[in-house]
Image (cartoon, helix red, strand yellow):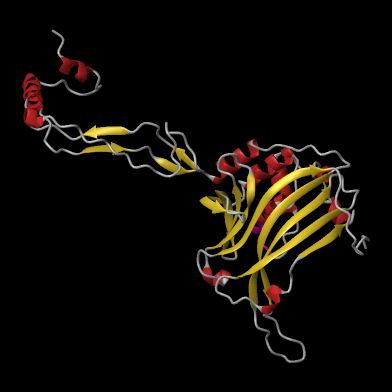
Amino acid sequence: MIDELDLVAGEKPDVAPYSPAAKAAARRRLAEPSRRRSLPALRLGRRPGLAVGGLAVGGLAVAAAVAVVTVVPAGPEGTLTPGAPVTASLPAITKMSAEEVLGRAARAVTDLHPRDDQFIEVRSQTMYGAFGGGGVSEGAGQAEPETRYLYRSRRTIWLSADGTRPGALKIEYLAPRAYPGWPIPEEAHRQQGTTWALLPACDQTKETAYTHLKGLPSDPDGMRAYLYGRNPGDNPPDVAAWTAVGDLLRENYLPAPQRAALFKAAATIPGVTVTEDAEDAAGRTGIGVGRVSNGVREDIVFDRGTYELLGERGIVVDEKEAKAPLGSLVASTAQLEVTVADVAPKVDDPNTGCG
């Protein structure tokens, strides 16, 4: 006769078979009505961002895909100890590295392929720190009081694809915000409404042209050399290189090969790490990749599903150096839309020269 307990035991590898005494004890317990109870459901804690089936989402990498259930040991003659706990070992979970996040961003790049006679149109929202005072006023010989506030705007820029046609910039001023820990100065409210500016076809404009950017290195090593070869100013080389990464992405559009190379090169800059939850200026949450400079962690934010660029943010990590409370937001941008336009708006601006 086939013993059902032997069948059960056969399905549990690497476990010693039940003894005859243990089988008899188990049958007696099952036959007693007072002993028939439904087993409590095994409750596994749900972790945010963990998908069914062990798939890694939300910027987390699952190191093991199978939960291991351990039954706590038997009592005399192999019987289960009443009330013995059942424990579950969940998969080990680790954060993605900056190299992995930026590598995925590099593999996800696409291209708009604008014609030379078209324009790259970029819509964005920005918030940056505006700083004033702190110096010595002329004549009085007294130090001017230092001021800080957060300047906010919505911007739309039209960039000539080949740099030979005038572009345009539209700025809609948003209500300023207090710089964390500082009062809003009077001058913060002076810029209001909407302004337009003409972008003449000069050398500076041509540097951001799509056709010019196609000439940048398309391999990670070459792009890294380019980032470190730019004028660093007063910044250390690694800080200047990370700043250059943001400059190439902000209100700009790199061709796909150069953008992929940029992301891969950015992963090699020392000090670059991952933040799981980073929010852009539009309130979208993604994965932040960044490094610390002057007491502020400067993140580039990517969509956690598509790895598309969302924007940037700056979070205080050293309140003494940043002169703001720990954890406060001091910079934020959002890239809302990037498209191709056949024409740029006409702007009546006396600044038409390239002098």
Q: If the image is split into quadrants, where does the C terminus sit?
A: bottom right
Residue 66 is left or right of residue 352, and the answer is left
The spot of residue 143 in percent (x, y) is: 67, 86
305 drawn magenta: no
The spot of residue 252 in percent (x, y) is: 75, 49
Q: Please identify the dominant SS of the magenta region.
A: helix
Residue 162 is left or right of residue 105, and the answer is right
Q: Residue at x 73, y 86 (%)?
A: 137
The spot of residue 34 in percent (x, y) is: 7, 31
**Nearest the camera: 339 or 298?**
339
Query: Could you tell me if residue 228 is visible in this image?
Result: no
Identify whether 161 is placed above or below 242. above
Which of the 4 quarters of the picture holds residue 100?
A: top right
Q: If the image is split into quadrants, where does the N terminus sit?
A: top left
The spot of residue 345 in percent (x, y) is: 86, 52
Q: Which residues are magenta?
A: 235-239
Which of the 4 quarters of the picture holds residue 53?
A: top left
Q: Residue at x 42, y 36 (%)?
A: 63
Residue 157 is left or right of residue 60, and the answer is right
- Badge count: 0
